[in-house]
């Protein structure tokens, strides 16, 4: 192996060791001081937080009698010479827990739904095609969630992902994807209103969050906390400023949150203040009712970012959120290294669209149309020289 590559890799190993050592020391210090943090003393630094405690222990609840649904969607995209093929699928897995025996499991629309196929022949930019594919998947998930809530008496609906669209999914005015985006907005409104009427809880489980809301807050808060000599001594010699700067919330919280422990609660709107004015006016109140926390569900897995649409303010709203977390915990105990709730795991497994399944759809499409791969494949896909 090239010596220059060895040298470069050695530098990377040194950097990794620095990160891991700093994280370990930081986590040990935070475990000692986290219960002494009173967020109420720093209102200017912790805007939109809804309680003064930094962390809270969640007690798992009995699931007997509860119906909990997991919703997830799958997407497969195949690019051809003059068109794109989009395959989407969404499924709801409903667990009805009983006092005796295992849960009864229902599926909607069925246990193994066929994927929906759509050909896109419009002249779109790469970004527009990415947005359209994402919006098609979101639309399928929302439709299934709405229908499942109508079909079954569900107490809690767990959506795989956030409870509101990501800013990157919003197309610019005049985009070819604008009509699909408006359809998705209408489906969000329909789901929110239906959940409110049914008195069911809507929860978003974000397993791969890239948010830095908590790390930025800690970066602002720690210099003030460490003015106390006893807290300063525990953090002395730890380059927490550097660590906070390079970390995302889940990575940093994993160093000191314990299993069954959540962070303080904050409003979703705090993260989108820069774009709240672009939300449709009737969605702003709904976005304001989405409360966010991080929960450590498994000993050796990263915390989950959890979004809950609450129906009340103050202590009552906090109680609603904690009751949802109390049900999520026992759903996530299957493995110490993987803390996703079982309904989400089952929905994810059934919603995925495999390469083999995509190939079968394409083969069927070609058989029915009379086209061949050499006709529709992109040039680079049929390069005879293996480029």
Image (cartoon, helix red, strand yellow):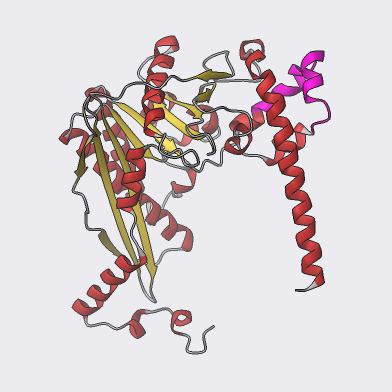
Residue 253: percent from left, percent from top: 60, 32
Is residue 12 depicted above or below 335 in this figure?
A: below
Residue 106: percent from left, percent from top: 19, 40
Please give left or right for residue 272 compared with residue 96 in the image.
right
Which residue shows up at 65% across the image and 17% down it?
44
Please give left or right for residue 250 compared with residue 161 in the image.
right
Q: Residue 308 colored magenta?
A: no
Which residue shows up at 32% across the image and 37% down it?
188
Question: Which of the two residues, 120 or 343, is positioned nearer the viewer here?
Answer: 343
Q: Residue 235 colored magenta?
A: yes
Please give left or right for residue 191 compared with residue 368 in the image.
right
Can you see residue 209? Answer: yes
The single residue placed furthest to the front in the displayed view is 101
- Position of the N terminus by quadrant: bottom right
Residue 375: percent from left, percent from top: 34, 84
- Position of the C terminus by quadrant: bottom right
Question: Which of the two residues, 247 or 165, is positioned nearer the viewer here?
Answer: 247
Is residue 283 depicted above or below 137 in this figure?
A: above
The single residue placed furthest to the bottom in the displayed view is 384
Q: Which segment did they paint magenta?
A: 217-238
Question: Which of the two residues, 183 or 299, is positioned nearer the viewer here?
Answer: 299
The single residue placed furthest to the left in the displayed view is 151
Q: How many numbered circles are shown?
A: 0
Which residue shows up at 24% across the image and 34% down it?
102
The quarter of the displayed image where residue 352 is located: bottom left
């Amino acid at each position: 192996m090239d010596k220059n590559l060895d040298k470069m890799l050695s530098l990377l190993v040194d950097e990794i060791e620095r990160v891991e050592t700093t994280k370990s020391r930081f986590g040990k210090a935070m475990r000692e001081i986290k219960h002494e943090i009173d967020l109420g003393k720093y209102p200017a630094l912790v805007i939109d937080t809804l309680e003064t405690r930094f962390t809270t222990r969640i007690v798992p609840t009995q699931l007997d009698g509860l119906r909990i649904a997991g919703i997830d969607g799958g997407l497969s995209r195949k690019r051809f010479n003059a068109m794109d093929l989009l395959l989407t699928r969404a499924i709801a897995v409903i667990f009805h827990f009983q006092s005796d025996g295992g849960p009864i499991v229902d599926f909607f629309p069925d246990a193994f739904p066929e994927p929906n196929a759509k050909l896109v022949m419009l002249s779109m930019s790469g970004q527009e095609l990415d947005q359209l594919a994402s919006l098609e998947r979101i639309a399928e998930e929302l439709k299934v969630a709405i229908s499942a809530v109508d079909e079954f008496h569900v107490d809690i609906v767990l959506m795989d992902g956030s409870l509101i669209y990501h800013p990157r999914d919003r197309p610019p005015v005049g985009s070819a994807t604008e009509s699909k985006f408006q359809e998705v907005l209408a489906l969000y409104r329909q789901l929110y209103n239906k959940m409110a009427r049914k008195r069911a809880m809507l929860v978003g489980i974000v397993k791969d969050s890239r948010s830095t809301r908590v790390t930025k807050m800690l970066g602002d808060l720690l210099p003030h906390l460490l003015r106390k000599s006893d807290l300063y001594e525990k953090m002395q010699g730890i380059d927490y400023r550097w660590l906070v700067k390079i970390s995302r919330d889940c990575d940093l919280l994993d160093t000191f949150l314990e299993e069954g422990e959540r962070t303080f609660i904050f409003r979703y709107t705090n993260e989108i203040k820069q774009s709240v004015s672009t939300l449709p006016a009737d969605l702003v109140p709904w976005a304001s009712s989405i409360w966010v926390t991080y929960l450590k569900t498994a000993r050796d897995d990263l915390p989950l970012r959890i979004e809950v649409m609450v129906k009340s303010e103050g202590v009552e709203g906090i109680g609603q959120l904690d009751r949802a977390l109390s049900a999520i915990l026992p759903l996530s105990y299957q493995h110490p290294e993987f803390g996703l709730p079982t309904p989400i795991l089952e929905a994810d497994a059934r919603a995925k669209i495999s390469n083999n399944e995509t190939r079968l759809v394409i083969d069927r499409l070609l058989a029915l149309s009379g086209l061949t791969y050499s006709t529709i494949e992109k040039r680079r896909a049929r390069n005879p020289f293996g480029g």
